[in-house]
Image (cartoon, rainbow, N blue to C red):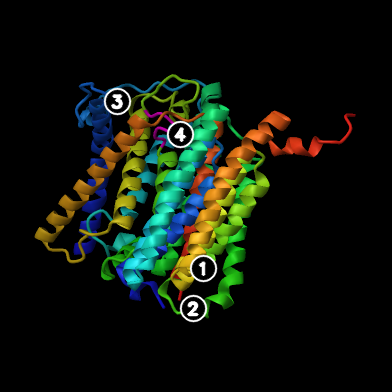
Amino acid sequence: MNGWLLAIVQTGLLIAAAPFLAGWVKWVKCRLQSRQGPPPWQPYRDLHRLFGKEVVVAAVASPIFRSAPYLIFSVTALACSVVPLVAIGLPTTAIADVIVLVGFFALGRFFLALAGMDIGTSFGGMGASREMTIASLAEPAMLLGVFTLAMTVHSTNLASMISYLLENPFQLYPSFVFAAMGMVLVAVAETGRIPIDNPATHLELTMVHEAMILEYSGRHLALMEWAAMLKLMIYSVLLVNLFCPWGLVVDYTPPALLQGLLVVTVKVLLLGTILAFAETALAKMRLFRVPQYLALAFILCLLGILSHVILEVN
Amino acid sequence: MALTQLSLAEQLVLTLAALILFTSFLLLAQNRIVSLIHTFAWQGVLLFVTTCLMAANSGRHHLFISAGLTLALKVFFIPWQLRRLVIKLDIRRDVEVVGGPSLVMIAGGVLVLFSYYVVLPIRELSFLASRNTIAISLAVILIGMLMIITRRKAVAQVIGFMSLENGLFFAAVVATYGMPMVVELGIAFDVLVAAILFGIFFFQLRSGIGSLDVDHLNRLHEVDR
């Protein structure tokens, strides 16, 4: 009972904190570019404003267009419940493993692409086809990275993966170095950050995610944007908790939980700062170079598996 | 021996070995000459750190001399020399098209697997903790060869040759704590002489066929047709 309560609170926390992370990255980025920048809690105001606005839907829109925001948001929220944020061994994490998590993302992306194509504008179709191209290249790399970890920890369940890593004191796995590098590249591609897609743009020929949600307004747009922020949050929490799991709570006492929350907050904000630095330093990539970028991610994850087989077994 | 039973320094050697393999892949994919030279220098740095770690772990201090030679030659002298040549020949901005980059990468991955299976019986002869890395060093050698085959420009081929030599040196260090000092010194001076000779060769090639693209050599005939 205690576990279920904690799981619900944890999921709610993840959903509630996601806009702050997006705002934080934006704020750090503005600071790095010597601009004042909106405060980190600006996304909450934006979401509040969007929820208050009226919804304008094109006359040709099908039910898919109307239902997609709710579907995408709920699928992403469901994915949140699988990710261990503060504590491990919760009942929700036992339901699904990483492969299901990747499946959740694929389901959300499927409806996102459908919604993008639904109205029939050229921007939406372009965005959808680009998103699917990127996803079809990023997903194998992501799964290969997950399998690299799974081979070491003998499980694809997130909670048992992390508890295995916590039980063994500090070990330097060569395959983890590669899996981490590859999964960072995949995460950047999947969350639409700068070398692949620019999250700050609204009318540009090269945009991907924004092109698909161009027709949305009001609470639909709010849900779509919130789902995108959630995705960024899930990937950052996954990266920090898989490759730097120290600080996660195993026993559910209030002081330990508070400490775990503090540690994970610091870790995620640190990752957000690094992301902001990278986005300031890098330029957006040409779309036709994206396959090369994702091939690098794939090769990294493949090297991870190979180095596990060659170096770590016996 | 499972990884968890090794000491942290030995685990670090394994990780460095994996990173050396990664730089080999980067060399294979890199198509700008100057970044190619920089990546080669980084491979040298990793090799230097690995050799130092092996020397400190095993207490064999002659390995520090080979590490120093690696640092002096492969991290500083040869990249500096190649960079100077590239600037002198004014090919700094040349972009070489690597034919089918993903295909070459897959071939690299296949070579890693191949060397793993080839090395399996050899590995049993060594008792060092780092014996698993023999496969990695063989893969580095083979990827160096693959690079020589796939590249057309002479500078890139020279870097492929040098990274092949890196693989040989790495194999010697991790399998048997390095070769005898005399052999090692001899190889080091060979590499040095090769680097200088290659420089002269570049100029000859350019004045002879007007390009560093060795494919032009195929078109040479005794009689102009």
The answer to whether the residue labelled 2 contacts the one labelled 4, judged by CB atoms less than 8 Å apart, is no
Residue A113 vertical position relative to residue B68 in the rendered view, above or below: above
At label 4, counting other C-alpha atoms closer than 10 Å, the crowd grade (few under 14, some 14-19, many 20 or more) is many
Q: CA distance from mark 1 to mark 4?
A: 37 Å
Q: Position of residue A84 (x, y in %)?
A: 29, 56
Q: Visible in this render: residue A43?
A: no
The answer to whether the residue labelled 2 contacts the one labelled 1, judged by CB atoms less than 8 Å apart, is yes
Q: Quadrant of residue B68?
A: bottom left
The answer to whether the residue labelled 2 contacts the one labelled 3, judged by CB atoms less than 8 Å apart, is no
Report which residue position mark 4 lands on. A196
Mark number, residue B197: none
Task: Name the amino acid type tagged 2.
Answer: Ser
- Residue B82 vs residue B46, the one in the foreground: B82
Under tag 2, what secondary structure? loop
Image point 73% across, 38% down: which residue?
A: B215
At label 3, counting other C-alpha atoms closer than 10 Å, the crowd grade (few under 14, some 14-19, many 20 or more) is some
Which segment did they paint magenta? Answer: A192-199
Majority secondary structure in the magenta region: loop
Which one is earlier in the sequence, the residue at label 3 or at label 4? 3
Which one is earlier in the sequence, the residue at label 2 or at label 1? 2
Mark number, residue B134: 1
